[in-house]
Image (tube, coloured by chain):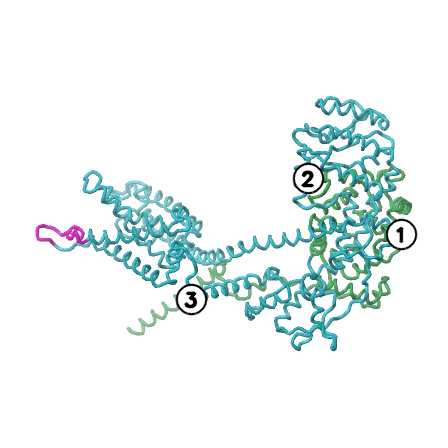
């Protein structure tokens, strides 16, 4: 429960008067207000700066230093104040946390000093409000990385390497080349060889002049075959070794093999090996030439060396939808204009616009304002449509491009922020859930431990004697409120595991063992709590207990609807039960009235044993039996 | 010659400038470019509604609280609602914090309507304190009247079964899912039936305020529980 709303607790308790006329059981006693003295001011002297606040404010968070009795250790008798020898600037934030319930992180403070103060005052940093949490986490991570770097360099300086396996060192060397000199050397060598390989591929195709025994210009690759082959082999050797080393060092080989970079590596070196295997077979030399094209993929290996390339690839990926839209609208425009031009130029002689696909080329060249001039319209209509085409091309291309460019940067930044928020959202929801279940669990725990009230209610004189209940006055009052709600509705709070367990047990129908305590508590509550009601329904209690006892032997049924009257059309087990208990219930049933119970017997028992399980409302149902018309007594199985 | 060239160049420069300005205006019109830097403030609407309660003496005269109690109440109120009034959303949020396991929003809605006596959609400190004065320091009659007012959703003086069913469902909603025994759909209805059995003396399907007060005063349990919360403040 947040601190601020503790002030509204009296209101919530007062509003509980609305439940009173509705409740059937008397309410538990209110917790004793023994310490109902006037609220007092406390003085907190932090290194000379005095802060004052109400005592209640501090008690909102009883598990911190200021909210618990731990602060008595710092009480200074002579000046009647609490003295702390800590930083007063950071203490301001700590005190505001008590006042407002939200902890803020001031940006100008050092993160480790702040953490120390929080630890001293017993406040966990996870409750920092959302407004400051991102900043806090960033600074903390930065600090941690710096500390890690420091410790690493320290270790290296001392020659005291942390015990890491060879594999882990290698992987770290590959991922962060700056960690060791060897890694750096490796990084530069591979970069150099990538560059060499790419340049080789390019130079291979340059004509080198007329060779001694040839008549025409040969590309260099065919003149100096051996040299280029050696260069190629050397590069591929290096790449293969690098790939194998990475594969060996990867912590998860399967994941590594599926990553983009490893696929690029493989594609870069495969053509060479395939070429080795296939030698000079003329049939497949066409395909072999195509394979050579893949050698250009080696240039993508540079993305390991360049952060910018990676970012570009990522942004292209994330803007795929915008690019797709641009492409789609362009295609539409191209088709429209190509059709129009084709039909416009159909009439002219020696027209280059032989078909619509042939006109595509003209349209694309015109719309992108290239204007090669290899296809030009000759008719007047063709020229008119041609000019419209070029104008609209400018518009169609020029307008979305700035939008896409701004989208790039917006989406890129947003992605960064969204990733951060997503990572924090899970943590935030977990925190909220923990706080919620913490509250609920606190209440359930107190119920189990304190074993409230049945005993205490019978001895009203002991109201003032407090058994040492844990928790502040606020917590006690809150629990009293929840207890009143339980009494009003005649149901109890459970926490999730116990609930699941009950459902499971119900479905397995281990009747006697698990539910006998509840039955006893039922009768217990029936006797003490609802004393008046038990008088009223004394005629019914034996019936219900008897049928309950009967039911224990009926393992397969969950809810029985005992009706006075026909309805033997259900399955045999039910009807048998009807027969059995009708004898017992005949005292109460008068007319054969089949009321709404029929509707509420939905399905055969096999399907929903859990749903109807444990619907024990003998209290309410039996009071309804009190008067005239015969109704249905719902007795649930145990 | 030269002047003609310069003139034409000058005209060209002017033409270019005009075209650039026109295209910028066009972009601004289309919303692609935003010139004004303070457009963010237009979007934010500051909630400038602020309400100050009447003086302490007047409130003391109208309610049955002492000055100190009013001070404590106001401090808590202002902490949570600095603007001085609570609207329904805030009210629901605050009330929901007390019942983490269930959904308290429906009951909070009814409660809000019960406190908002002038039905203006917000609860000021005066409304708050007047309501609390009835609940905590009022006579039994007053408290019962307040409870009846809570149940009477449309404030027509009669509590029908449907209204009671709504209230009952909202109370059961606050329990949440994890209860023992498991909450069934008929439970609220059964509860309403019991209630009407007790309260509706002439069996006309509605409960009037006299029947209500009459029955409650005869019921020991209810009387006892009404006095439970006397000493909250």
- Callout 3 secondary element: helix
Q: Secondary structure at mark 1?
A: helix
User: Could you say where residue A123 lies in the image, as x and y percent from the top left?
Assistant: 63, 63
Q: CA distance from mark 1 to mark 3?
A: 79 Å
Q: Nearer the viewer, residue A124 or A266?
A: A124
Residue B168 horizontal/vertical position (percent): 77, 44
Q: Which residue is mark 1?
A: B141
Q: Which chain is green?
A: B
Where residue A624 appears, as percent x and y from the top left, is 83, 35
Q: Secondary structure at mark 2?
A: helix
Image quarter of the C terminus of chain A: top right
- For disc 2, the chain is A
Q: Residue at x 47, y 56 (%)?
A: A411
Which span is picked out in magenta?
A210-227
Q: Residue furthest left?
A: A213
Task: Tell me which corner region of the image, top left, top right, bottom left or bottom right, holds residue A628.
Answer: top right
Residue A449 magenta: no
Image hue for chain A: cyan
In the figure, is residue A265 to the left or right of A73?
Answer: left
* Residue holding disc 3: A153
Q: Is residue A479 above or below residue A35?
A: above
Q: Residues within 10 Å of mark 2 (few under 14, many from 20)?
A: many
Q: Is residue A67 left or right of residue B211?
A: left
Disc 2 versus disc 1: distance between alpha carbons?
43 Å
Q: Is residue B129 visible?
A: yes
The circle on residue B60 is none
Residue identifier under label 2: A502
> Quick check: A83 above or below A162?
below
Rounded to the nearest whole Å, what is the CA distance between mark 2 and mark 3?
57 Å
Residue B85 lies, in percent from the top left, at: 73, 61
**Dots 2 and 1: beta carbons under 8 Å?**
no
Residue displayed at 80% across by 23% down: A565
């Amino acid at each position: 429960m947040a601190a601020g709303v503790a002030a509204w607790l009296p209101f919530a308790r007062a509003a509980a008067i609305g439940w009173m006329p509705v409740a059937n059981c008397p309410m538990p006693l209110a917790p004793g207000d023994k310490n109902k003295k006037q609220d007092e001011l406390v003085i907190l002297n932090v290194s000379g700066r005095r802060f004052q606040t109400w005592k209640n404010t501090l008690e909102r968070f009883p598990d911190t230093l200021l909210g618990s009795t731990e602060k008595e250790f710092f009480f200074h008798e002579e000046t009647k104040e609490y003295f702390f020898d800590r930083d007063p600037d950071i203490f301001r934030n700590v005190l505001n946390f008590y006042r407002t319930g939200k902890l803020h992180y001031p940006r100008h403070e050092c993160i480790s000093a702040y953490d120390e103060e929080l630890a001293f005052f017993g406040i966990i940093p996870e409750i920092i409000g959302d407004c400051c949490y991102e900043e806090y986490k960033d600074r903390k991570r930065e600090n941690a990385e710096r500390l890690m770097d420091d410790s690493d360099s320290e270790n290296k300086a001392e020659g005291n390497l942390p015990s890491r396996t060879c594999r882990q060192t290698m992987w770290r060397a590959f991922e962060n080349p700056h960690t060791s000199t060897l890694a750096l050397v490796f990084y530069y060598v591979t970069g150099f060889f990538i560059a060499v390989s790419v340049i080789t591929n390019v130079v291979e195709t340059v004509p080198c002049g007329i060779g001694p025994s040839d008549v025409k210009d040969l590309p260099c690759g065919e003149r100096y075959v051996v040299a280029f082959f050696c260069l190629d082999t050397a590069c591929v050797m290096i790449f293969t070794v690098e790939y194998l080393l990475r594969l060996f060092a990867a912590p998860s080989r399967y994941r590594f093999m599926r990553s983009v970079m490893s696929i690029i590596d493989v594609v870069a070196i495969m053509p060479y090996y395939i070429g080795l295997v296939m030698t000079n077979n003329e049939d497949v030399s066409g395909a072999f030439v195509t394979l050579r094209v893949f050698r250009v993929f080696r240039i993508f290996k540079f993305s390991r060396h360049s952060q910018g390339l990676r970012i570009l690839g990522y942004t292209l990926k994330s803007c795929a939808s915008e690019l797709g839209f641009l492409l789609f609208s362009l295609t539409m425009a191209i088709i429209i204009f190509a059709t129009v031009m084709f039909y416009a130029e159909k009439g002219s002689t020696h027209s280059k616009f032989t078909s619509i696909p042939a006109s595509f080329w003209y349209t694309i060249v015109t719309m992108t304002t290239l204007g090669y001039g290899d296809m030009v319209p000759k008719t007047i209509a063709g020229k008119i449509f041609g000019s419209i085409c070029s104008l609209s091309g400018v518009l169609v291309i020029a307008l979305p491009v700035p939008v896409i460019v701004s989208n790039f940067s917006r989406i890129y930044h947003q992605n960064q922020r969204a990733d951060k928020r997503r990572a924090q959202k899970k943590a935030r929801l977990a925190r909220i859930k923990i706080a919620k279940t913490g509250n609920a669990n606190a209440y359930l725990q107190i119920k189990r431990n304190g074993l409230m009230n049945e005993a205490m209610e019978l001895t009203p004189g002991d109201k003032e004697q407090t058994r040492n209940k844990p928790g502040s006055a606020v917590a006690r009052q809150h629990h009293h409120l929840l207890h009143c709600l339980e009494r009003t509705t005649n149901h109890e709070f459970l926490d999730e595991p116990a609930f699941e367990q009950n459902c499971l047990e119900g479905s397995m129908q281990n009747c006697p063992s698990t539910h006998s305590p509840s039955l006893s508590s039922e009768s217990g509550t029936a006797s003490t709590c609802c004393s008046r009601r038990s008088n009223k329904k004394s005629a019914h209690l034996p019936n219900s207990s008897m049928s309950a006892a009967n039911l224990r032997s009926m393992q397969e049924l969950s809810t029985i609807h005992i009706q006075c009257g026909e309805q033997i059309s259900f399955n045999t087990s039910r009807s048998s039960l009807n027969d059995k208990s009708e004898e017992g219930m005949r005292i109460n049933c008068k007319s054969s009235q089949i009321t709404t119970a029929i509707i509420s017997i939905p399905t055969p028992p096999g399907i929903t044993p859990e749903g109807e399980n444990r619907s024990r409302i003998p209290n309410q149902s039996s009071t309804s039996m009190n008067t005239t018309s015969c109704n249905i007594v719902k007795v649930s199985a145990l | 010659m030269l002047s003609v060239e310069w003139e034409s160049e000058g005209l060209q420069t002017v033409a270019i400038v005009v075209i650039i300005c026109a295209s910028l205006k066009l972009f601004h019109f289309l919303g692609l470019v935003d010139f004004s830097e303070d457009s963010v403030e237009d979007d934010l609407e500051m909630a400038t509604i602020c309400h100050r309660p009447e003086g302490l003496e007047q409130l003391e005269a109208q309610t049955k609280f002492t000055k100190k109690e009013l001070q404590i109440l106001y401090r808590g109120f202002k902490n949570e609602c600095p603007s001085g009034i609570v609207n329904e959303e805030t009210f629901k949020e605050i009330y929901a914090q007390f019942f983490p396991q269930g959904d308290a929003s429906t009951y909070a809605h009814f409660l809000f309507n019960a406190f908002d006596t002038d039905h203006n959609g917000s609860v000021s400190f005066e409304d708050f304190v007047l309501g609390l004065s009835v609940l905590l320091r009022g006579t039994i009659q007053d408290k019962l009247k307040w409870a009846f007012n809570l149940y009477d959703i449309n404030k027509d003086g009669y509590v029908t079964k449907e209204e009671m069913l709504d209230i009952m469902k909202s109370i059961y909603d606050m329990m949440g899912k994890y209860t023992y025994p498991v909450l069934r759909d008929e439970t609220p209805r059964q509860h309403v039936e019991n209630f009407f059995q007790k309260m509706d003396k002439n069996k006309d399907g509605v409960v009037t305020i006299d029947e209500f007060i009459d029955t409650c005063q005869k019921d020991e349990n209810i009387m006892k529980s009404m006095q439970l919360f006397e000493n909250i403040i």
